[in-house]
Image: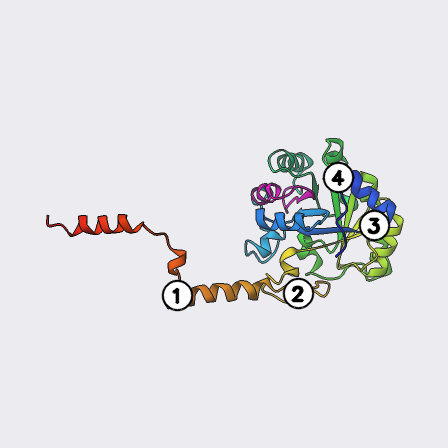
Amino acid sequence: MDRIEAVSKVTIPWILERKLRGEKIACLTAYDYPTARLVDEAGVDILLVGDSLGEVVLGYDSTLPVTADEILHHLRAARRGTRRALVVADLPYGSYHVGREEALRVAVRFLKEGGAEAVKLEGGRKRGALIRRLVREEIPVMGHIGLTPQSVHALGGHRVQGKTLESAAELLADAQAVEDAGAFALVLEGIPRELAGIITRRLRIPTVGIGAGPDCDGQILVLHDIIGLTFGPGAKFVRPYANARELLRAACESYREDVARGRYPSDQESYHWSQSLCEHFEKEVSRPA
């Protein structure tokens, strides 16, 4: 296993330096204290409290119902489990669509109350003014273009973007606009590898791919996807690293069976009186009233 780089705290300047040095950036999602702690201890560089929690934790059928309060709740828990990684929080759908001041208010809450060190939002050129506004108020921003899940209805589903020359040129313009607005990094989701490589070479800020091929400066995946803790078919780009679903199910089944058969708890798993106290109590309760 590769050695975790000896840095006590990942910062935005450190992330930017990784691109200059040609070193990859590892990112994962986490939504609570135990998963954040495990992700952090594994040496992952960026921990995203993503709106994907709506699907993998809260049971929604998309990210759209997720609220700022739900993100904040999970962000606080994840922050308590994180020491090294840079903590980024998703601005959920609706939190930045009704005005820049509302977006600023939510972003400030995420940093001030939740402990986030940056926020992520979806969209390209149309988000330029908003990104500038947030950055002007010392709120670091990670952009996100390509397949943007909050636009699932407009896109007609979770479909690969940038498959034509025209749409590829649009995404390249979006990427440049996000960088020009002051974002420190850019997520590229669901686009052809070749386009992701061109965008990565054009930008000064790091690109982080998810379903965008290996030529990005970093990669991000949903933790529950890589440990098998989701219940639907995985996307093409998801590589399973463990099967926590079957492990947890087997543990629960074994527990249920042990309880049903009287095998749990055992004598060793029970608390005991001393022999003298036991004898004394038995005498007390056996006396005639």
| Residue type for callout 1 | Arg
Q: What stretch is highlighted in magenta?
A: 71-96
The residue lying furthest to the top in this view is: 137
Pointer 2 local density, CA inside 10 Å: few below 14, some 14–19, many at least 20:
few
Q: Nearer the viewer, residue 116 or 266?
A: 266
| Residue picked out by circle 3 | 23
Question: Reading the chain from its start, which is encountered first: label 4 or label 3?
Answer: 4
Question: Reading the chain from its start, which is encountered first: label 2 or label 3?
Answer: 3
The residue lying furthest to the left in this view is: 289
Image coords of residue 113 (percent x, y): 60, 35
Question: Which mark is drawn over residue 263?
Answer: 1
Pointer 4 local density, CA inside 10 Å: few below 14, some 14–19, many at least 20:
some
| Residue type for callout 2 | Gly
Pointer 1 local density, CA inside 10 Å: few below 14, some 14–19, many at least 20:
few
Query: Which residue sits at x=64%, y=63%?
Result: 242
Query: Which residue sits at x=77%, y=36%?
Result: 132
Give the colour scheme shown.
Answer: rainbow
Image coords of residue 57 (percent x, y): 56, 54
The local secondary structure at tag 4 comes to: loop
* Closer to the eye: label 2 or 3: 3
In which quadrant of the rendered image does the N terminus lie?
bottom right
**Left or right placement of residue 5 versus residue 255 in this view:** right
Alpha-carbon distance for marks 4 and 1? 51 Å
The question of residue 28 being in magenta is answered with no
Question: Which mark is drawn over residue 11?
Answer: 4
Question: Reading the chain from its start, which is encountered first: label 4 or label 1?
Answer: 4
